[in-house]
Amino acid sequence: MPHLTDLHLENWLALYSAAAVCCSISVLISVGAVLAQLYREQAWTRLNTFRAVLMFGPKTWWRWQKLYLHSTPVTLAIVISFALTLPWG
């Protein structure tokens, strides 16, 4: 198995860094969107039973997951388009 050249190693590090930046931005945006939704709906007013309190965390987490996973195609498109500009040669 051949080893990576310095150029390929730098390119892969740049791609992983770009993916990390895109994912970090996606996390921040999705957390902000969930917090805004919870505030707009005033979700804490419906915490009047034990079951509602118990399920608040998982429901909020699932809401965040759905928003975060919607960013996957955009993240992939950005990272792939960045990879196509790198000199692999």
Image (cartoon, helix red, strand yellow):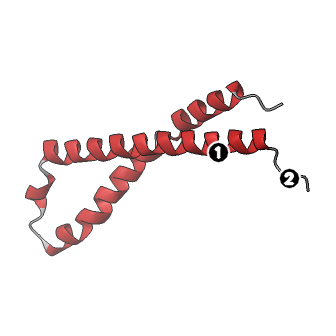
Q: Is residue 84 left or right of residue 18?
A: right
* Residue type indicated by callout 1: Leu
How many discs appear? 2
Residue name at image x 64 percent, y 27 percent: 81
Q: Quadrant of residue 87?
A: top right
- Residue at image position (53%, 37%) is 75
| Other-residue count near label 1 (Cα within 10 Å), few / some / many at <14 / 14–19 / ≥20 | few
Residue at numbered disc 1 = 13
Residue 15 pos. (x, y %): 63, 40
Query: Hey, which quadrant is residue 59 in on the image?
Result: bottom left
Reading the image, the residue beneath label 2 is 3
The extreme bottom residue here reads 50
SS of the residue under disc 2: loop
Name the image quarter holding residue 53: bottom left
Give 1 or 67, whichever is nearer the viewer. Answer: 1
Mark 1 lies on a secondary structure that is helix
Q: Earlier in the sequence, mark 2 or mark 1?
A: 2
Residue 64 in the image: above or below residue 51: above
Q: Position of residue 79 (x, y in %)?
A: 60, 35
Q: Position of residue 29 (x, y in %)?
A: 34, 40
Percent position (x, y) of residue 40?
A: 14, 41
